């Protein structure tokens, strides 16, 4: 692990696109829309955002919710983190669908389903490799602060009922005590996960308390935080994402729509970063920072990750404002900064979704449990 970086904390919230959450970053040079209707807080409803809703949005057969939150007014702490840390403006949901597959991409770089499992049946369990399992095999301490029913790590044979899977309600106490392990994954239950129709400021406040608890425990300078949102939530975004993978019906699966990713901590280089990245970049970055070997999942192992945004030798960034204090955001630049050009897509033609790799090296067929209308040909890059 690079000197001074002793911990990686991955925090996952729910259901918002980059345009939906960060319109206030436009004057600072972020590539975000600025003239859409302002969203009410709390949102009025939870719009469809599964694989079929994504397909309709992708093909123009349907629309997404076309509005934006006033970042500076209702999400000022996130605005502060974006301005003082790294803002990955072209980070994407790993798959164009809803929650569970995207959470699984963060935990282990692949998903054995393309939809949320039914709540009326026992939750499925798959023997998949995972980032926490890799950490344990490498004698790196870890803990998953999960949502109810061990979501989402309860889908993994090697993680289900592990003593290292605990309730998210214990995170703040552990962080203040300075007793967090080297690898931490954190999820929250509704309404603090920001899933519509929750009040998004309440979710932001809990993230603020969580980060401040790490600061109080003396861990700011040695911790790299990665905060993201699991999927698009049915919200619009103006940037077309590159096609990297597609399902048997020839519909783009990856990359999914843009969702925010904030990296911050004492050693993180601040600024707006325009590279294409996705949810598999998050565990790959943790692997690189923690000095772990490859996981054995090509989609993850071949990802370049984001560890280059961490410089342990730099003068430590100041800690964020303490929870409950006034956040003083800087005035908008005048004139406003211009956004960077959207980078070209990664080289190579899109590929069909590959098989699922199990821990013993055997495979399962690619998931195809959310079929869509057959398209005449695969998507273009």
Image: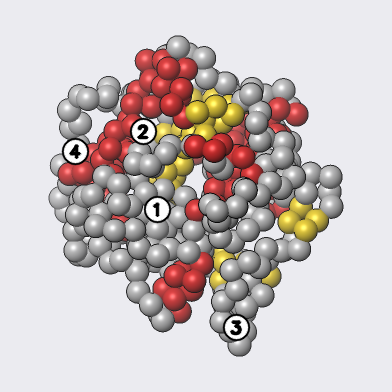
- Residue 64 figure quarter: bottom left
- Dot 2 surroundings within 10 Å: few (below 14), some, or many (20 or more)? many
Which residue has dot 4 on it?
Answer: 330
Question: Could you say where residue 94 lies in the image, as x and y percent from the top left?
Answer: 54, 56
**Pointer 2 or 1: first along the chain:** 1
- In depth, the one of 111 and 37 nearer the eye is 111
Which residue has dot 1 on it?
Answer: 15
Query: Distance of mark 1 from mark 3, alpha carbons?
Result: 27 Å
- Dot 4 surroundings within 10 Å: few (below 14), some, or many (20 or more)? few
Query: Distance of mark 1 from mark 4, alpha carbons?
Result: 27 Å
- Residue at the image position 38 percent from the left and 20 percent from the top: 213
Query: Distance of mark 2 from mark 3, alpha carbons?
Result: 41 Å
Residue 246 can be seen in this image: no
Vertically, is 114 above or below 140? Answer: below
Query: Distance of mark 4 from mark 3, alpha carbons?
Result: 49 Å
Q: What secondary structure is found at the residue carrying circle 3?
A: loop
Query: Distance of mark 4 from mark 2, alpha carbons?
Result: 21 Å
- Dot 1 surroundings within 10 Å: few (below 14), some, or many (20 or more)? many
Residue sitting at the far top: 177
Q: In the rendered structure, are the residues bearing label 2 and label 1 in contact, judged by CB atoms less than 8 Å apart?
A: no
Which residue has dot 2 on it?
Answer: 207
**Pointer 4 or 3: first along the chain:** 4
Which residue has dot 3 on it?
Answer: 374
């Amino acid at each position: 692990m690079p000197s001074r970086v002793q911990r990686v904390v991955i925090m996952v919230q729910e259901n918002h696109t980059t345009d939906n959450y960060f319109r206030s970053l436009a004057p600072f040079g972020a590539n975000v829309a600025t003239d859409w209707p302002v969203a009410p807080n709390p949102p009025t409803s939870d719009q469809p955002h599964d694989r079929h809703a994504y397909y309709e949005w992708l093909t123009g057969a349907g629309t997404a919710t076309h509005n934006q939150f006033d970042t500076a007014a209702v999400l000022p702490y996130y605005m502060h983190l974006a301005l003082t840390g790294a803002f990955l403006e072209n980070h994407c949901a790993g798959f164009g669908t809803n929650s569970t597959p995207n959470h699984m991409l963060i935990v282990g770089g692949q998903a054995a389903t393309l939809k949320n499992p039914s709540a009326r049946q026992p939750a499925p369990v798959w023997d998949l490799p995972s980032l926490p399992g890799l950490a344990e095999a490498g004698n790196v301490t870890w803990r998953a602060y999960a949502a109810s029913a061990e979501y989402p790590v309860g889908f993994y044979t090697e993680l289900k009922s592990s003593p290292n899977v605990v309730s998210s309600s214990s995170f703040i106490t552990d962080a203040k005590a300075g007793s967090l392990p080297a690898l931490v994954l954190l999820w929250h239950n509704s309404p603090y996960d920001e899933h519509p129709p929750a009040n998004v400021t309440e979710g932001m406040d809990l993230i603020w308390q969580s980060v401040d608890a790490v600061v109080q425990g003396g861990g700011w300078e040695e911790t790299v935080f990665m905060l993201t949102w699991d999927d698009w939530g049915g919200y619009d975004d103006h940037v077309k994402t590159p096609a990297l993978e597609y399902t048997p019906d020839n519909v783009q699966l990856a990359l999914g729509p843009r969702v925010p990713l904030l990296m911050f901590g004492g050693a993180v280089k601040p600024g707006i970063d325009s590279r294409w990245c996705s949810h598999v970049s998050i565990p790959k970055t943790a692997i690189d920072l923690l000095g772990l070997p490859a996981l054995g999942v090509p989609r993850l192992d071949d990802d370049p990750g984001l560890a280059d945004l961490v410089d342990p030798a730099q003068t430590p960034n100041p800690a964020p404002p303490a929870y409950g204090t006034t956040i003083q955001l800087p005035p908008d630049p005048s004139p406003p900064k211009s956004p960077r050009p959207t980078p070209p897509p990664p080289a190579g033609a899109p590929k069909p979704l590959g098989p699922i790799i199990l821990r013993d090296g055997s495979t399962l067929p690619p998931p195809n449990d959310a079929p869509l209308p057959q398209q005449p040909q695969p998507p273009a890059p």
